[in-house]
């Protein structure tokens, strides 16, 4: 049964009973011409076979756009937009991880009236529930923030997670956990976002082991967890962990979730060690409450133990620091100079350039004076 998410008005579709919700969704809206943004690998998914069979039966016509890379460039997204512009379509549909949904979001910004169905094929980004996208211009990350970025409908299909490599599952799961934690301590947090972060963390820990073992019910649970974390950052935005992580992807080729987790792994203990740097206008009690929520959801008795537990999770997933051989002489300065200042405004503590240099040093070389356990 299709239902509405009362938080943002999205139509929520499930993949049960051979995609009965999807058939109903196409039927009630009379969608016939589908513009599909996807990566080539989706041909392996049961969902793809379903929509291809609908096409073969003459029920729908599909134009598919796949001409973009992970971390999509604006030039590729623009070509997709032009293709969309030149032929009429009833529905914009994206099937994939962050990149496909981001390209579709870019297109939707020019056609905000077109219905937009997103199908996340990883449990991590939560992109299906946010009003922002990440598109690269000349290799530099650009954030797109526009209400049209929010899909009007979402299909949750846990079967799409079955064929993912464990490393990718671990990395995307950690992205979701970082979203939940960063949203929790963000200066923009409120009761609603805190309850979303809390629920996201609870589900991540409840489903983590089964998800890594590829149990269908836990894949479904992790999709929900990542979605809740997406809702949380849609309200608050992310903080220093995400502000620091983008150039790690660029320099060392680390997937986004892996890079974000390495950053949170050094940021969290550093925050705990430096309460005097508080800049959240609500003061330390708000931040301490966030720490307590995190500790509670981690199932430990103090924020310091939560930071250690986070490190242990990274270690257990083999999400280590970049290889020393990859690290250039000037990398600390390079990374420190590229921290995203916009996201830093959301961080509850004021970090200077020296702070970031220290954090990157810890991240890359495991040195420094925090109490976290080195994960490499
Ligand atoms: Fe993220």
Image: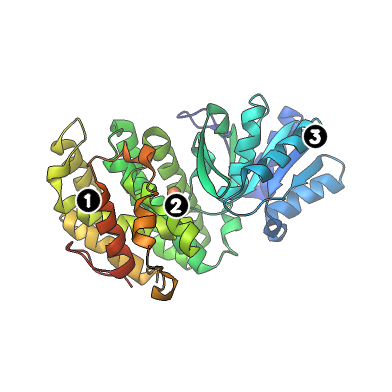
**Mark 1, other Cα within 10 Å: few <14 / some 14–19 / many ≥20:** some
Pointer 1 or 3: first along the chain = 3
Pointer 2 or 3: first along the chain = 3
Q: Quadrant of residue 283?
A: top left
**Mark 3, other Cα within 10 Å: few <14 / some 14–19 / many ≥20:** some
Q: Which residue is mark 1?
A: 296
The residue lying at 80 percent from left, 34 percent from top is 32
Give the distance between the C-alpha atoms of the residues marked 2 and 1, in whole angstroms: 29 Å
Q: Is mark 3 within 8 Å of ligand 1?
A: no
**Residue farthest toward the front in the current orientation of the protein:** 330
Disc 3, SS: loop
**Residue farthest toward the bottom in the current orientation of the protein:** 325
- Can residue 205 be seen at all in this image of the molecule? no
- Horizontal side, residue 7 vs residue 308: left or right: right
Q: Pick the residue in front: 315 or 199.
A: 315
Q: How many marks?
A: 3
Q: Pick the residue in front: 329 or 103.
A: 329
The residue lying at 22 percent from left, 51 percent from top is 296
Q: Pick the residue in front: 200 or 144.
A: 144
- Horizontal side, residue 123 vs residue 176: left or right: right
The residue lying at 28 percent from left, 53 percent from top is 356
Question: x, y (%) of residue 82?
Answer: 75, 35
Residue 317 lies, with reference to residue 138, above or below; the image says: below
Disc 1, SS: helix
Q: Which residue is mark 2?
A: 246
Give the distance between the C-alpha atoms of the residues marked 1 and 3, in whole angstroms: 48 Å
> What colouring style does the render use?
rainbow
Give the distance between the C-alpha atoms of the residues marked 2 and 3, in whole angstroms: 38 Å
- Horizontal side, residue 275 vs residue 311: left or right: left
Disc 2, SS: helix
Q: Which residue is mark 3?
A: 32
């Amino acid at each position: 049964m299709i239902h509405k998410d009362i938080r943002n008005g999205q139509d929520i579709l499930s993949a049960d009973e051979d995609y009965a919700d999807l058939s109903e969704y196409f039927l009630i809206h009379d969608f016939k011409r589908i513009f599909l943004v996807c990566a080539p690998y989706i041909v392996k998914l049961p969902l793809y076979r379903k929509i291809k069979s609908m096409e073969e039966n003459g029920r729908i016509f599909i134009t598919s756009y796949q001409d973009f890379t992970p971390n999509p460039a604006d030039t590729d997204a623009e070509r997709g937009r032009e293709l969309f512009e030149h032929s009429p379509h009833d529905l914009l549909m994206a099937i994939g991880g962050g990149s496909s949904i981001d390209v579709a979001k870019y297109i939707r910004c020019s056609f905000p009236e077109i219905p937009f169905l997103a199908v996340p094929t990883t449990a991590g980004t939560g992109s299906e529930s946010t009003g922002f996208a990440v598109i690269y211009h000349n290799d530099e990350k650009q954030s797109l923030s526009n209400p049209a970025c929010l899909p009007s409908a979402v299909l949750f299909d846990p079967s799409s997670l079955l064929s993912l490599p464990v490393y990718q599952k671990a990395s995307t799961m950690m992205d979701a956990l970082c979203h939940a934690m960063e949203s929790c301590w963000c200066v923009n947090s409120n009761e609603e976002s805190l309850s979303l972060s809390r629920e996201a963390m609870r589900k991540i820990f409840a489903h983590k082991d089964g998800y890594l073992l590829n149990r269908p019910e836990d894949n479904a649970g992790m999709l929900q967890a990542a979605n809740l974390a997406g809702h949380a950052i849609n309200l608050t935005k992310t903080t220093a962990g995400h502000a620091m992580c983008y150039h790690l992807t660029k320099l060392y080729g680390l997937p986004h979730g892996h890079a974000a987790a390495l950053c949170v792994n050094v940021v969290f203990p550093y925050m705990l060690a430096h309460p005097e740097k508080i800049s959240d206008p609500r003061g330390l009690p708000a931040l301490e409450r966030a720490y307590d929520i995190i500790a509670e959801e981690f199932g430990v008795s103090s924020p310091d133990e939560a930071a250690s537990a986070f490190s242990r999770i990274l270690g257990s997933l083999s999400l280590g620091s970049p290889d020393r051989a990859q690290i250039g002489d000037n990398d600390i300065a390079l990374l420190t100079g590229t921290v995203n200042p916009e996201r830093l405004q959301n961080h509850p503590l004021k970090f200077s350039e020296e702070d970031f240099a220290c954090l990157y040093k810890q991240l890359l070389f495991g040195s420094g004076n925090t109490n976290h356990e080195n994960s490499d």
